[in-house]
Amino acid sequence: MLSRRTWQHTLHIHDSALAATTRDNYRRALTRYKEWADAERVPKHMQLPIREQVVCAFAASFAGVYSAGAARSAIAGLKYYHEKKGWRWPSSARLSRILAAVRLHAPATSQRAPRPPVTLAMLDEALLHLDLNRGFDLCVATTMLVVFWGQMRLGEALPTTRAYDFSSMPAVKHAKLRADAGGDLSQETTAIWLPRTKTARTGDWVWLARHHNDPSYALHRHFRANRLAPNDPLFAYRHDRTDEVTPLTKRAFMARLNEIWVAAGMQRVSGHCFRIGSTTALLRAGVAPEVVKMAGRWRSDAFLRYWRSIDAIISQHADLCEVTWKGHDSEVPPF
């Protein structure tokens, strides 16, 4: 038999395959199921390992109350718990049909409105109003361009607090600028190594092509103006008062940009709107879907929903903006 210590280590490695947020969601799913089972007076010996009839009834309890996504997430959490325990999971065609039916019965209040994309007009508006001679604003501008054109999740680039975790967040040394943007002569395309992503726990590369308001030039200017060392956070700035290197946080980044966009009559957006916007912009520009998928590190074809619903998204965005954007074709881009 294995020692208790060895088995605990094995289970710890097993759990580490999931992101911390996913593990928390699965734990809550197990708690919700136990509370439901107790309320339904399901005998303890039938609760775990769960029986097919019981899991079907639990899934059906979501109908008319919660979204199909909530139901599937809860069932996924229970399945994960069974796999961890080495128990057989009672999958069935009946359970699949019930989960499909939950979607049909989902209340209107559970349907979240499609998040609007960050647009090229919004990037231009931000660059017009950010003070690129100020370290903080330059850092915000650089982050905006890199996250947008790299189809990055905001959590891959910025921390939630100033306590920077270098094991999961990029440093300056992780950026390989292309030759004409101050990099090595052999570097044809700018690349950024992400130590950890949502879908690649051991890290992945982001590749940045040339664009109007080029993110590679922005990175070069950002590194020099903020005097960043190789081991500093990739997106950090010199504090106005103390001159200390300060990591840019997600909250500070979004607050600064939303301040500009709301003042211009544009809508307030969230961090995920950057990934939606960049995917939309690339597809609208005629970039092949398979290239967008590969460059954006998409593990499925989920990104195509932004393409297929683009008319509705752009229409909604235009209605919310309440402004007509006129491009500054005659102006020289800052990057």
Image (cartoon, rainbow, N blue to C red):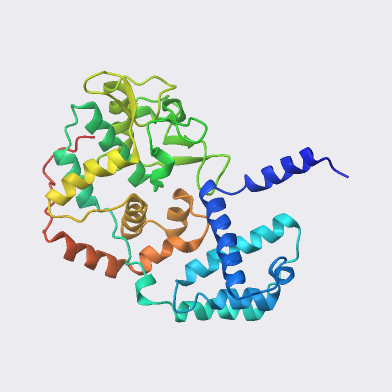
User: Toward the viewer: 121 or 266?
Assistant: 266
Q: Residue at x 49, y 40 (%)?
A: 205
Q: Residue at x 42, y 64 (%)?
A: 304
Quarter of the image that includes the N terminus = top right
Q: Is any part of residue 10 visible from this angle?
A: yes
Q: Is any part of residue 210 visible from this angle?
A: no
In the rendered view, tell whether residue 306 sits above or below residue 96: above
Q: Residue at x 45, y 81 (%)?
A: 105
In the rendered view, tell whether residue 280 sits above or below residue 59: above
User: Toward the viewer: 64 or 229?
Assistant: 64
User: Toward the viewer: 323 or 254?
Assistant: 254
Q: Residue 244, position in %: x, y?
A: 31, 19
User: Toward the viewer: 320 or 246?
Assistant: 246
Q: Residue 209, position in %: x, y?
A: 37, 42
The tally of labels here is 0
Q: Quadrant of residue 185?
A: top left
In the rendered view, tell whether residue 171 sits above or below residue 194: above
Report whether 224 appears left or right of 194.
left
Quarter of the image that includes the C terminus = top left
Q: Residue 313, position in %: x, y?
A: 28, 65
Report whether 322 appears left or right of 184.
left
